[in-house]
Image (cartoon, coloured by chain):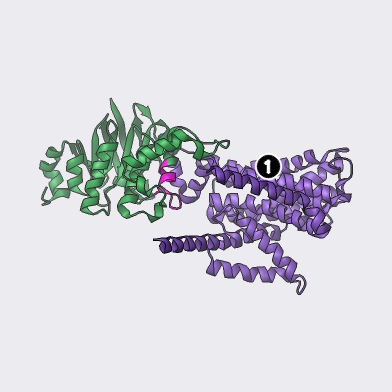
């Protein structure tokens, strides 16, 4: 037990050193890729809070991602001298605000109704962002907003600083989301996924519990969206509110494994890896991802993570057999 | 005082009337069986009492308090629990996690986002005690969906009882069980419901006559008779309508 703990600590320290040194080893191009990977991991994990852990499929999760981006971009445009962390906070708060407005309605439905309602609201928000061009910049979006620095330099001129900022915030998000699954609340959440009626009969309020999950999920999606906007210094309707942005985390989660906490991260890694590889040969990354999704759904319904854990189980039982 | 009382309880599904004014009186501490042929409205009676449906007319009282149309979670919090005819556990959670959810509910731990549930020693201990009482300790890490039928039924009943309700309604707990499993389940219910009031729907007459202090016979949505087991056994109306030439 104690040994286990010290191994853990050593692994953590090694990981931290690796992440700290990374931008100096792999160069700016790949550093930015790591940041994007972390952003989409948090985005997919926030979706999986709903999909995998509460049994709610949303076709409009980009809403919260986009609200995070627009919130931060508008705040930095209109509030002179705003520091970067409050700006991210405003983005997350904007996403939370939207979730609070929608939650009284959406927590009372589930299944197809939940999915379709989110498709509708997501598209509505997309169109609103295009039409309110005086505020949102329409199709152009909001670009070149001021980028305050973490210390003195502007973040836009110092991608390494941005890398540290993003990784710290996103790492914290991953840890928080992981922690939630371990709390009593996390147990009630999976209880709702498995059997909402029984949760009700045990004395828990299902809609209220769902609302808390929903708001938490929006909060983390908002942070991801905010950092995404900062990383590009641009927030646009197509780029952060579009339909593809709602489907991306669903597909990544399905490929990685809906049932496991870390599945979505694996899914995003596969996504990005393939993106990077096939962009050298063809532009149609969506086509390749579609084919992979079909294969995974048909042959690995528990996703790559489910496949790995069933492999481990088989190996374990084989070694047990050999021993006896 | 009666712990549970229904007054002129009625329920319809659209044009189909299922309950025609049921007046049920359950005394504190008794084990009361509701029997009757299929379609008599037994489960509907349970569902209107426990908040699955709001009754079309009539009232329900628990300890003298009007609880008509209370949603299930409110009933659970004031001490009314129920189990289901069709096993309704958390399929992807282990037996331990299933019972633990009931224990957490009993202790009112609902929105705790700040502690790991595995580190709540008191909760784990209570959960383990419950698992031992229901002979599921060995299977504590088995998913509910992988338990044998008898064991999953035991889990189903225990979840209703683990919240420590004052009154528990058991809907056909022995449905589909073998003779042996039924005997175990009867013993389990005797053990776990000591000091509690139990209302049970049951088809197995052996179970009914061995467990119940009093019996109510429901027939086409009305009460045909209520009384002690021997009175029911000898009641001519009941014989005609339901028990018939059953050897009991």
Q: Chain under label 1?
A: A
Q: Which chain is green?
A: B
Toward the viewer: A236 or A159?
A159
SS of the residue at dot 1? helix
Picture quadrant where residue A219 is located: top right
Picture quadrant where residue B134 is located: top left
Q: Which chain is purple?
A: A
Q: Within 10 angstroms of label 1, few (less than 14), some, or many (20 or more) residues?
A: many
x and y, in percent, of residue A49 in the image:
59, 49
Toward the viewer: A157 or B160?
A157
Report the quarter where the N terminus of chain B lies: top left
What residue is shown at x 42% (from left), y 61% (from top)? A323
x and y, in percent, of residue A113 in the image:
56, 54
Residue A69 shown left or right of residue B141 in the figure: right
Whether A192 is drawn above or below B23: the answer is: below
Whether A38 is drawn above or below B103: the answer is: below
What residue is shown at x 75% (from left), y 43% (from top)? A91
Whether B77 is drawn above or below A115: the answer is: above
x and y, in percent, of residue B75 in the image:
41, 35
State which region is magenta. B88-99
What residue is shown at x 40% (from left), y 54% (from top)? B145
Q: Is residue B82 visible to us here?
A: no
Picture quadrant where residue B124 is located: top left
Residue B220 shown left or right of residue A50 in the figure: left
Answer whether residue B98 is magenta in the image.
yes
x and y, in percent, of residue B133 in the image:
31, 40
Q: Label 1, on which residue?
A: A96
């Amino acid at each position: 037990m104690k040994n286990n703990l010290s191994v853990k600590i050593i692994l953590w320290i090694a990981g931290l050193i690796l992440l700290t040194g990374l931008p100096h080893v792999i160069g700016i191009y790949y550093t930015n890729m790591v940041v994007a990977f972390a952003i989409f991991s948090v985005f997919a994990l926030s979706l999986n809070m709903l999909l995998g852990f509460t049994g709610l499929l949303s076709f409009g999760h980009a809403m919260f991602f986009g609200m995070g981006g627009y919130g931060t971009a508008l705040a930095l445009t209109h509030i002179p001298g705003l520091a970067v962390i409050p700006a991210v906070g405003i983005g997350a708060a904007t996403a939370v605000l939207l979730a609070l407005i929608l939650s009284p309605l959406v927590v009372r439905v589930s299944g197809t109704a939940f999915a379709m309602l989110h498709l509708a609201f997501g598209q509505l928000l997309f169109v609103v962002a295009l039409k309110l061009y005086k505020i949102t910049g329409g199709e152009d979006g909001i670009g070149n907003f001021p980028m305050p620095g973490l210390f003195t330099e502007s973040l836009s001129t110092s991608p390494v600083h941005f890398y540290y900022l993003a990784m710290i915030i996103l790492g914290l998000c991953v840890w928080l989301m992981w922690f939630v699954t371990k709390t009593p609340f996390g147990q009630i959440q999976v209880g709702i996924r498995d059997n909402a009626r029984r949760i009700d009969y045990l004395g828990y309020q299902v809609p209220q519990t769902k609302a808390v999950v929903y708001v938490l999920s929006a909060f983390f999606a908002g942070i991801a969206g905010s950092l995404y906007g900062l990383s590009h210094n641009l927030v646009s309707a197509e780029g952060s509110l579009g339909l593809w942005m709602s489907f991306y985390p669903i597909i990544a989660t399905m490929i990685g494994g809906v049932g496991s906490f870390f599945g979505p991260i694996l899914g995003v890694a596969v996504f990005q890896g393939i993106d990077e590889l096939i962009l050298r040969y063809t532009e149609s990354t969506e086509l390749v991802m579609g084919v992979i999704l079909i294969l995974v759904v048909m042959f690995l319904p528990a996703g790559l993570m489910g496949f790995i854990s069933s492999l481990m189980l088989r190996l374990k039982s084989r070694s047990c057999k050999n021993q006896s | 005082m009666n712990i549970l009382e229904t007054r002129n309880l009625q329920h319809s599904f659209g044009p189909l009337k299922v309950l025609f004014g049921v007046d049920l009186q359950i005394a504190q501490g008794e084990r009361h069986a509701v029997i009757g042929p299929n379609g008599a409205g037994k489960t509907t009676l349970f569902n209107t009492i426990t908040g699955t449906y709001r009754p079309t007319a009539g009232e329900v009282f628990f300890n003298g308090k009007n609880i008509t149309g209370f949603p299930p979670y409110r009933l659970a919090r004031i001490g009314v629990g129920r189990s289901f005819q069709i096993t309704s556990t958390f399929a992807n959670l282990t037996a331990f996690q299933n019972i633990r959810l009931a224990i957490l509910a009993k202790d009112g731990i609902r929105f705790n986002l700040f502690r790991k549930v595995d580190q709540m020693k008191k909760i784990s201990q209570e959960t383990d005690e419950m698992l031992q009482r229901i002979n599921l300790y060995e299977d504590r890490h088995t998913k509910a969906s992988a338990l044998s039928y008898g064991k999953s039924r035991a889990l189903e009943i225990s979840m209703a009882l683990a919240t420590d309700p004052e009154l528990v309604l058991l809907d056909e707990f022995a449905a589909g069980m073998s003779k042996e499993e039924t005997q175990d389940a009867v013993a389990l219910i005797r053990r776990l419901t000591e000091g509690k009031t139990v209302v049970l729907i049951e088809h197995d007459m052996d179970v009914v006559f061995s467990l119940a202090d009093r019996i109510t016979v429901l027939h086409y949505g009305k009460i045909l008779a209520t009384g002690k087991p021997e009175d029911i056994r000898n009641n001519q109306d009941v014989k005609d309508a339901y028990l018939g030439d059953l050897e009991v």
